[in-house]
Image (cartoon, rainbow, N blue to C red):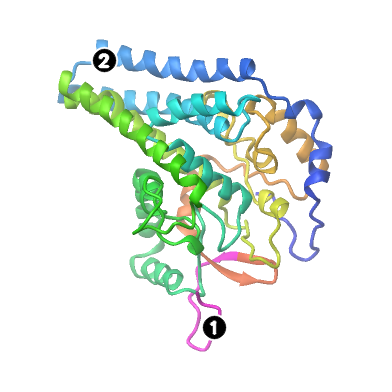
């Protein structure tokens, strides 16, 4: 990955300066341009499900085929997730109500609380790579007991074992744990829940005006669960598990992979109040090479993420053009890591857990402080 020099601080442009270098057509969004991409993802997902149901016997002998199906259809269904995500950003169309209706249905079908996540994801964008106020994949600080405990555990069981456990738990359980208890969320907001915006959970994530929307989101997910329950009763719980649950878990794994790798790397800093700005945080996003198939199916969410964070209303079909303009105008700030995704996942899980303050923000460290170090900044 290209390293941004620590010896000569780079001037960070303003939001207006960034927008000025992006062609104006990149900000044009249209329902009729966005809808075919969403329909392709939805229809492809449904067709694969019907094909599997029709041709793969529901027996343990065929378990390998069902696993293969889960991976393929889960990978395809990520496109549905990304299209709904664009609705939440107002990048899908010009009419908010139309976008919310489409996004609500698509996200609810994937058991995602649409409005709740729209809110928390907006905070993630608004505070990207802020060391305390960020949202999702916020690293622990060495100045806290939680941060030091992570490094002590890592040192005790060994970095390879700790990395393997980290990959397995984050890809397998990271997304539902984030929705249920705010795992990897901002430390300032405490224990949060995307389905219940009231006690015993912290209410910092959802202001009073958002609470009805959170409950609508919960109702959408409950409706989807009710349909799955009806399907299980009418047909078979095993059929629901094979056709729906397997791909659902793969979707979650992809989602965590994207969000984790987009904002985490050995040389990507986090910043506290005095150094953080919206543009500086956005330029801490990392584009990565997901390959032509994932790019096509996932609407280029991983290879144009820097542009997405600089302006989330740029629709995905204009993001490559915007990325080229940003890379050309700000070559020293734009980040791209060419490492293969499996290698990148391992590197991040192996070494990117706890940050320590330096002269240029908070950077990842593997070293526990000595007994004499000043930890007065501990939270």
Residue 300's quadrant in the figure? top right
The residue closer to the viewer here, 60 or 304, is 304
Residue depicted at x 35% and y 32%: 248
**Direction from residue 93 to residue 293 in the image, left or right:** left
**Direction from residue 107 to residue 264 in the image, left or right:** right
**Main secondary structure along the magenta-highlighted residues:** loop
**Direction from residue 354 to residue 59 in the image, left or right:** left
Q: Which residues are magenta?
A: 363-379
The residue closer to the viewer here, 215 or 28, is 215
Choose the circle earlier in sequence order: 2 or 1.
2
- Against 156, residue 51 (above or below) is above
Q: Position of residue 57 (x, y in %)?
A: 19, 16
Residue 19's quadrant in the figure? top right
**Direction from residue 250 to residue 206 in the image, left or right:** right
Magenta stretch encompasses residue 128: no
Q: Position of residue 130 (x, y in %)?
A: 60, 59
User: SS at mark 1?
Assistant: loop
User: SS at mark 2?
Assistant: helix
Q: How many residues crowd around disc 1 within 10 Å: few (fewer than 14), some, or many (20 or more)? A: few
Residue depicted at x 60% and y 26%: 92
Q: Which mark is residue 376?
A: 1
Q: Which mark is residue 53?
A: 2
Magenta stretch encompasses residue 368: yes
Q: Position of residue 189 (x, y in %)?
A: 48, 60
Observer able to see residue 344: no
């Amino acid at each position: 990955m290209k390293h941004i020099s620590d010896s000569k601080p780079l001037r960070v442009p303003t939001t207006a300066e960034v927008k000025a270098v992006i062609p104006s057509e990149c900000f044009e969004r249209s329902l009729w341009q966005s809808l075919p991409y969403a329909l392709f993802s939805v229809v492809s997902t449904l067709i694969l499900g019907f094909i599997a149901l029709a041709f793969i016997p529901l027996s343990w002998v065929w378990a390998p085929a069902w696993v293969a199906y889960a991976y393929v259809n889960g990978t395809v269904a990520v496109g549905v997730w990304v299209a709904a995500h664009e609705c939440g950003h107002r990048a899908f169309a010009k009419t908010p109500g139309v976008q919310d209706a489409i996004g609500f249905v698509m996200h609810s079908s994937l058991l995602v609380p649409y409005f709740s996540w729209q809110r928390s994801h907006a905070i993630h964008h608004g505070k990207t790579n802020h060391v305390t106020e960020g949202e999702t994949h916020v690293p622990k600080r060495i100045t806290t007991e939680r941060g030091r405990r992570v490094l002590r555990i890592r040192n005790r069981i060994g970095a390879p074992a700790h990395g393997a456990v980290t990959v397995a738990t984050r890809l397998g359980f990271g997304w539902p744990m984030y929705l249920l208890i705010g795992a990897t969320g901002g430390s300032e907001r405490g224990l949060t829940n995307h389905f219940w915006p009231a006690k015993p959970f912290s209410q910092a994530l959802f202001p009073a005006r958002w609470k009805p929307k959170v409950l609508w989101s919960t109702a959408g997910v409950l409706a989807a669960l009710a349909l799955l329950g009806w399907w299980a009763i009418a047909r078979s719980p095993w059929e629901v598990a094979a056709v729906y649950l397997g791909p659902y878990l793969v979707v979650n794994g992809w989602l965590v992979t994207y969000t984790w790798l987009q904002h985490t790397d050995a040389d990507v800093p986090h910043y506290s109040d005095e150094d953080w700005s919206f543009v500086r945080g956005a330029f801490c996003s990392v584009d990565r090479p997901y390959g032509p198939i994932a790019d096509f199916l996932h609407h280029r969410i991983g290879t144009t993420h820097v542009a997405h964070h600089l302006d989330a209303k740029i629709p995905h079909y204009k993001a490559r053009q915007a990325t080229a303009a940003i890379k050309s105008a700000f070559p020293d700030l734009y980040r791209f890591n060419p490492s293969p995704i499996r290698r990148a996942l391992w590197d991040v899980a192996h070494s990117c857990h706890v940050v320590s303050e330096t002269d240029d923000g908070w950077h990842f460290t593997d070293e526990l402080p000595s007994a004499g170090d000043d930890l007065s900044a501990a939270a």
